[in-house]
Amino acid sequence: MLWDWQFAFSILPQILAALKITISATFAGFLLALILGMLFMFLSRSRVQPVSVVVKWLVQFIRNTPLLVQLYFVFYVFPELGVSLSPFTAGVIGLGIHYSTYLSEVFRSGIDAVPKGQWEACRALNFTRSQTWWKIIIPQGIPPVIPVIGNYLISMFKDTPLLSAITLVEILQTAKIIGSGTFRYLESFTIVGVLFFLLSYPASKLVKYMENRWNPRY
Amino acid sequence: MTQTAQPMVQYSKVSKSYGDLKVLKQIDFEIGKGEKVVLIGPSGSGKTTLARLLMTLERPDSGTITVDGTPLWHEMVKGKLVKAGEKHLRKMRGNIGMVFQHFNLFPNMTVLKNVMEAPVSVLKTSKDEAREKAEAMLDRIGLLDKANSYPAKLSGGQKQRVAIARALVMNPRIMIFDEPTSALDPELVGEVLDVIKSIADNEEMTMLLITHEMDFALDIADRVAFFDGGTIVEQGPPQKIFYEPESPRLKAFLRRFSRSGLRSGGE
């Protein structure tokens, strides 16, 4: 089986078009993961015992089950409960919830690293809880963990091919469709792999750069 | 230095435990208006906890604390005394300021912003007015030229002076100093004690100071209270406590600081 350049270039536009789906699923999923991750972090610190216990258990459960299983659940099981979702929406929700559990742990470790004295100084100066969080704690706690969060973004990007299992036509699925139509798999899968590399590698370099620039920060 | 009929702070049968450890045992203690009280004692004796309860950093297990006649940790709701809610605590907290052993400056803000932030956010002072007051306060402690620096660039003594400015700019009626110089290199202690002395020169300021600087306590204290094992063992004027101690435990504690070794205020 020899590499056919002409064939490779002919299928490139189709794959690149699907890349848009891959990238938008990544960003939408990550946005959801960030928001839910913050929410889970706050709730796990709640002084209302039942809330923090339930949230902690939920986070552990989702972290310790495979993303693929969760995607199947959202796409195939939810309709039986009356909620029918498109592959894109189901994919974004599955990615978002799954990664929010990792991010909530990351946020928590960042916040826990802020010295207790900062909380006490805020109380002594009579800041409200909200002011304490947004002016003092989060600006200190979050920047050091941004590189870790960046790595999770890259991870999520590389997980998007899983969404082909719930019929989303992103780049992997596109490659499979081309392959089964032309019986040429070499070029399509190679292009998909190279595209992932071309985006992931510089991104991971950027994350490394951020890590060196921001740690130590103070 | 005047002591009027109603004390500024009154602890009544205050107890606090951490798990099995009883840190404060049924403490009765008063601080008069404008009085400067120094707490001394070995670590774990309860003096820091006493201060922290006043600053509402911890809740007493039992007993009451009143500030200028008003209960701190309790409030009157429909004629009944109940555990105070956050609103009441915030109202009371406005009267009290605290300076910590490890400064606790906000590293993500400049010195000026550290001093301005609370007046703007909490007292709702305008930014211009807050800036003016902050600059005046920094000038008073000799750190105006560091206004735009970040705390990381300051020495320990400078950080602590900024921390004092930050607390003072909120106009508290009671200032608490929890071992303000214990974390400083010896040559930096004097500049901080000078600032605290200038605060003590204000007759109206009620001060609670926890320190091992005995010379300084002799200089500014109206009363010294010796804590040990969760109770006040002995209290009285500094001259008496340091030079005519009565209880054996106080004598043993003072022996660690021999007469010639009493640390001087700096220079």
Image (tube, rainbow, N blue to C red):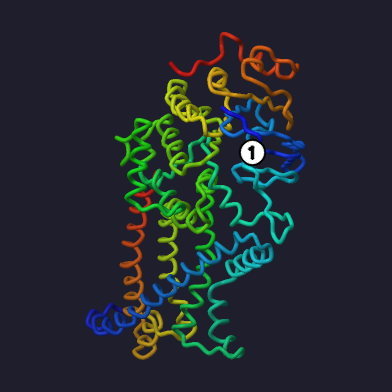
Tell me where residue B134 appears, x and y as whole percent.
36, 42
User: Which residue does the image show at 73% across and 41% down from the upper left?
Assistant: B17
**Quadrant of the image containing the N terminus of chain B:** top right
**Quadrant of the image containing the C terminus of chain B:** top left
- Residue positioned most to the front: B5
User: Which residue does the image show at 44% across and 74% down from the upper left?
Assistant: A29
Tell me where residue B61 appears, x and y as whole percent.
73, 46
Answer left or right for A203 relative to A36: left
User: Which residue does the image show at 40% across and 65% down from the upper left?
Assistant: A154
The image shows residue A182, relative to residue B74, as above or below, that is: below
- Residue positioned most to the top: B260
Answer left or right for B96 relative to B190: right
Question: In the image shown, does B244 or B155 lie closer to the viewer?
Answer: B244
What is the quadrant of residue B150 in the picture?
Answer: top left
Question: In the image shown, does B160 or B72 lie closer to the viewer?
Answer: B72
The image shows residue B217, relative to residue A156, as above or below, that is: above
Chain letter belonging to callout 1: B
The image shows residue B193, relative to residue B81, as above or below, that is: above
Looking at the rendered structure, the kind of residue marked 1 is Val
Tell me where residue A168 appears, x and y as whole percent.
43, 84
Label 1 packing within 10 angstroms: few (<14), some (14-19), many (20+): many
Question: In the image shown, does A22 or B8 lie closer to the viewer?
Answer: B8
Q: Secondary structure at mark 1?
A: strand
User: Which residue does the image show at 37% across and 85% down from the upper left?
Assistant: A179
Q: Which residue is mark 1?
A: B9
Answer left or right for A61 relative to A135: right
Count of residue discs: 1
Tell me where residue A144 appears, x and y as whole percent.
43, 52
The image shows residue B240, relative to residue B126, as above or below, that is: above
- Residue positioned most to the left: A6
Answer left or right for A148 relative to A212: right
